[in-house]
Amino acid sequence: MPGGSIYVQPNEKYTGSSPQWWYEKFWREDAANRRKYRYAKAAVGFVIGVALGLRFGLEGASALTGLLLAGAVAGGDWFVYWYSFHKTAVWRGARRGETITGRALRRSLGRSGYRVLDGRAIRGQASIDHLVIGPGGVWIVDNESWSPDTEIACYAGRLFFGEKYGSKVAKALVERAEAFAELLTRETGVPVTITPVMAVHCGLMPKGGVVMAEGLTLLRPKLAAKLIRSADGDVLNDAQIELLTRTAARELQRV
């Protein structure tokens, strides 16, 4: 695939005539047009910079101000396009969402007494990407990505991905949270309620980057740790956290 990563195994989903393959193809073919428009924007920036230099009595340095503003405009334009492409990396298969989210969770929550277990499953049943246990309670965090133009929203309490209902996605993750909670409660004797969270790596999210619908919270990966830290910190004590973590490590299969 165009621009594939040597660190991610090829997947049929991202090859051939998939939306991801075509997205990369059109992106690369449009590079010449992006450069042309960038030069035009930089030229306008140069003219404005020169005019500003003359306006503020910098006749001797007006050309320099023009060049500086042209460079800033070109650099800003490049960054905007690069960032829009970079945000689709997980959807395109160039990066792994669970790696990104797992690293962010451990970095942000480790010092606050939280434990993060990656890639866990109840034997013979569905798996999850991250199990987070700490003072504020227990969460499961899964990772997903949709095409860049897919709007993710809640209308009248229902979850939508574009024009499609998201009820199956929400129900599946809510049921996994309930199954994990039942297992941990049974094995430890500690009453556990697990909050399901989905880290969305690509797709159109509303302002604020959070959607709550049908028992599921969807958010940008960088907001997951913030959501967890905002919970009441007196739900579990150190002994319970240790017991739940050891039990999860023993009873849940690594995937």
Image: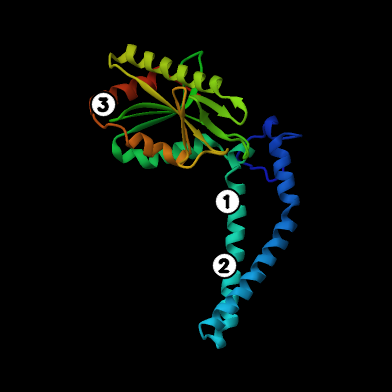
Looking at the image, residue 79 sits to the left or right of residue 196; the answer is right
Colouring chosen for the image of the structure: rainbow
Estimate how packed mark 1 is, as few (under 14), some (14 to 19) or many (20 or more) residues with alpha carbons within 10 Å: few
Residue 99 x/y as whole percent: 50, 37
Residue of label 2: 72
Q: Residue at x 33, y 37 (%)?
A: 229
Q: Earlier in the sequence, mark 2 or mark 1?
A: 2
Q: Residue at x 73, y 40 (%)?
A: 22
Which numbered dot is residue 83? 1
Q: Secondary structure at mark 3?
A: loop
Q: Secondary structure at mark 2?
A: helix
The amino acid at mark 3 is: Val
> For the residues marked 1 and 3, what is the alpha-carbon distance in whole angstroms?
39 Å
The amino acid at mark 1 is: Tyr
Q: Are marks 1 and 3 in contact (CB under 8 Å)?
A: no
Residue of label 3: 235
Estimate how packed mark 3 is, as few (under 14), some (14 to 19) or many (20 or more) residues with alpha carbons within 10 Å: some
Looking at the image, residue 88 sits to the left or right of residue 178; the answer is right
Above or below, 162 against 124 in this view is below
Residue 52 x/y as whole percent: 55, 78
